[in-house]
Image (cartoon, grey):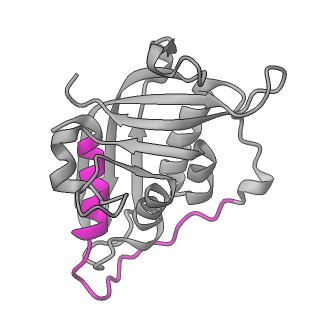
């Protein structure tokens, strides 16, 4: 299974699988971080990924949303669409992508609400490692006109729960970033998050 498929399956599992226990005494409180008063830097490409890691580790949905462009897409490997895909265009067929709202909804469940079926609470702690500084950003002829840059990175994700239960996943992902600011005042965000677990 591809890298993003693994994380997507993990998130979907936390959304779907985490539906069982009606009340969980270990349901943790999320860390209350006022994003408006915290000066997060989005002026460089690597800082966006650093902020993404911080959002996971702080269980901070507001910061997570700031990392994504409004036209954000999460792209699965096509073969995983039947398993975890969503019908985004209403044609009755599961698509191999979803957009900003669905991604935010998954992360609200992951960070704050637990699974939609109440099987799992939000994790007590998330550790996400993405060694983004080891690889240079590149251009892609497919998105040259849009000005996207990309980087293929390895990730490691660990979810920890009270009582010692853990979930972990690792693999590869391709992040496409777009500058939504100006040349003088750049403001980068993730426009495409693509599962590259086949790498």
Residue extending farthest front: 91
Q: Which residues are magenta?
A: 5-33
**Image-quadrant location for residue 110:** bottom left
Vertical arrangement, residue 66 with respect to residue 4, above or below: below
Q: Is residue 150 magenta?
A: no
Q: Residue at x 24, y 56 (%)?
A: 94
Q: Nearer the viewer, residue 65 or 28?
A: 65
Q: Indicate the position of residue 168 as horizontal and vertical percent values.
A: 25, 47
Residue extending farthest bottom: 22
Quadrant where the C terminus is found in the figure:
top left
Q: Is residue 22 magenta?
A: yes
Left or right, residue 51 beside residue 166? right
Q: Nearer the viewer, residue 152 or 164?
A: 152
Left or right, residue 50 beside residue 40? left
Q: Indicate the position of residue 24 as horizontal and vertical percent values.
A: 32, 82
Q: Indicate the position of residue 118 as horizontal and vertical percent values.
A: 30, 79
Vertical arrangement, residue 54 with respect to residue 180, above or below: below
**Image-quadrant location for residue 26:** bottom left
Vertical arrangement, residue 173 with respect to residue 106, above or below: above
Left or right, residue 170 beside residue 1? right
Q: Indicate the position of residue 148 as horizontal and vertical percent values.
A: 56, 24
Q: Residue at x 18, y 45 (%)?
A: 80
Vertical arrangement, residue 60 with respect to residue 18, above or below: above
Q: Residue at x 24, y 43 (%)?
A: 5
Residue extending farthest right: 184
Quadrant where the N terminus is found in the figure:
top left
Q: Residue at x 28, y 51 (%)?
A: 95
| Number of marks present in the image shown | 0
């Amino acid at each position: 299974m591809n890298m993003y498929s693994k994380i997507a399956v993990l998130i979907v599992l936390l959304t779907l699988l985490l539906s069982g226990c009606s009340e969980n005494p270990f349901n943790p409180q999320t860390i209350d971080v006022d994003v408006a008063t915290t000066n997060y830097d989005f002026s460089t490409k690597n800082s966006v990924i650093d902020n993404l890691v911080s959002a996971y580790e702080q269980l901070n949905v507001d910061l997570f949303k700031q990392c994504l462009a409004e036209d954000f897409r999460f792209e699965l490997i096509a073969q995983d669409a039947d398993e975890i895909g969503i019908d985004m265009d209403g044609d009755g067929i599961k698509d191999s992508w979803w957009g900003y709202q669905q991604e935010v909804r998954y992360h609200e469940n992951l960070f704050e609400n637990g699974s939609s079926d109440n099987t799992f609470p939000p994790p007590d702690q998330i550790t996400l490692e993405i060694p983004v500084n080891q690889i240079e950003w590149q251009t892609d002829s497919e998105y040259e006109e849009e000005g996207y840059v990309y980087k293929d990175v390895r990730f490691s994700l660990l979810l920890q729960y009270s009582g010692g239960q853990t979930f972990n996943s690792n693999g590869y992902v391709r992040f496409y970033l777009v500058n939504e600011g100006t040349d003088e005042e750049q403001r980068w965000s993730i426009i495409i998050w693509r599962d590259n677990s086949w790498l």
